[in-house]
Image: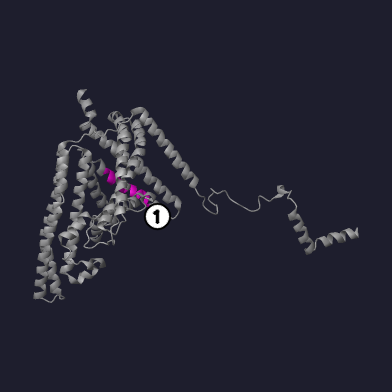
Amino acid sequence: MANEITAVDQSTTPAASSEHKALQSKLPSKYRHIAAVHARQRTSCLSHDSEKSPSFLGFRNLMVIVLVVMNLRLVVENFMKYGVLICIRCHDYRRNDILLSTLLYALVPCHLFVAYIIELGAAHHAKGALGRIKRSTDARSPDSSIQASRTFQATWYIIAWAHGINATSCLLVTTYTVYYHIHHPFIGTICQIHAIIVWLKNCSYAFTNRDLRHAYLNPASASTLPEIYSKCRYPRNVTISNLAYFWWAPTLVYQPVYPRSSSIRWLFVVKRLAECFGLSVFIWLATVQYAAPVLRNSLDKMAVWDIASIVERLMKLSTISIILWLAGFFAIFQSVLNALAETMRFGDREFYTEWWNSPSVGHYWRTWNKPVYHFMRRHIYSPLVGRGFSHVFASAMVFVFSGFLHELLVGVPTHNIIGVAFVGMLVQLPMIAITAPLERSQGMNGRVMGNCLFWVSFCLVGQPLAALIYYFAWQVKYGSYSREVKVS
């Protein structure tokens, strides 16, 4: 017995233990059932106290597949129910629409030339006034500053009236012509967009040159001008070439100088134009084949105010409307504006940022359309705040002005100024107030909730409802529904 114990003790020495482990490694393992599966504390990956957030890449792939399958089903159902509705030769525009729209496209930019004539006269007067100030008194004396301010104020009222009449006549003539003489809504919309763009550029050109002229007559305040403006100081910026560049530049905000790229990549331009052409064809096909039948089938429900059926049509219309909007957004802001910027060697090409991740409605309006946002902030919001108005009031005025422009863009071409687009923009103010705390929240849950509220208001309540109302108003006034009502 003692010999056996001694043998066991010897087998437990380090040398014996290593030999034993080596022997075990050579033998096949037969005792897998004793592995310690539960060796430490762990949590479910979807629990809040999980150590790391799980990846939802598979769910994203599933949602994409489900979305594609559901829309393919709608495509098959559409063809089974309506057949092919696409007709290249079928159109509802008139010869007069083409002639008037072409004439407007040629004449509207002439208002920019009139603005140049006004600014040329203002610059000439400013140079004469500055020369008289320098000859009469010391340019650094207080009397010189007072005299320069009086000269500036005396001429600015005349120049402001001239610019106001010029810019307003540009918009009024186009709006009158589109509303009373251009029948086709799409052609009228293109004319309105062009006129509003030129109108906004006119306003920015006048306001910016006003401040540049003030700094020119008050050299002490010239130091507050942006450094980039030193490359083309006032009044050297008042030239035809400078204004022509601003006319074609993909921006609504005038500057004497813009950041410029070194060369033009023509292959880049061709690719962007090809994208725009392909997306335009897709938008046309999707509108004719899918959106139009849904809108036509909604007329009877709108006439009798069948709420349940209207909600069902809105939900059905929301899918195709968001697809069309996204395609239009990419075609304009990614393809057209980038192609135009490359052609003009325009350096600042941040026409949008990640608006699809917006944690609030306000963040969306600040990020999805940068050219318009820059105009509103520079020429409406900031001047109001600088004059002592509150941020809330300034923001409200921005949306009132934006609502006016939206009504011009939608109500005038459809010949139904019913205020839906205007009210829709005003409704954004309470939506911004509701979702603003979610944007400021520290955790991700609030921002995710804000993004969901944004998408619900955007996809279901916003565009589909406005499209349905204006389509119904158009059909009641001019379309087949109007003829049915008259016959009955």
Quadrant into which the N terminus falls: bottom right
Measured as percent of width and height from the top left, residue 347 is found at: 29, 59
Residue 425 is covered by the magenta coloring: yes
72 with respect to 30 (left or right): left
* Front-most of residues 137 and 350: 350
Quarter holding the C terminus is top left
Region rendered in magenta:
423-436
Q: Is residue 418 visible?
A: no
In the structure shown, which secondary structural element does the residue marked by tag 1 occupy?
helix
Q: Is residue 474 left or right of residue 334?
A: left
Colour theme: one colour
Dividing the picture into quadrants, the one containing residue 442 is: bottom left
Q: Does residue 291 sit above or below 334 in this rendering?
A: above
Q: In percent of the image, x 20 and y 60: which residue is there?
A: 208
Q: Is residue 99 magenta?
A: no
- Which of 342 and 401 lies nearest the eye of the viewer? 342
Does residue 477 show up? yes
Residue annotated with mark 1: 440
**Above or below 164: residue 297:** above
Q: Residue at x 14, y 52 (%)?
A: 111
Q: Position of residue 9 (x, y in %)?
A: 83, 61
For label 1, count other residues whose C-alpha is less than 10 Å away and answer few (under 14), some (14-19) or many (20+). few
Q: Amino acid at mark 1?
A: Arg
Where residue 186 appears, as percent x and y from the top left, is 23, 40
Chief secondary structure of the magenta span?
helix
Q: Quadrant of residue 293?
A: top left
- Residue in the picture at 10% in, 62% down: 121
**Percent x, y for residue 17?**
77, 60
Q: Quadrant of residue 21?
A: bottom right
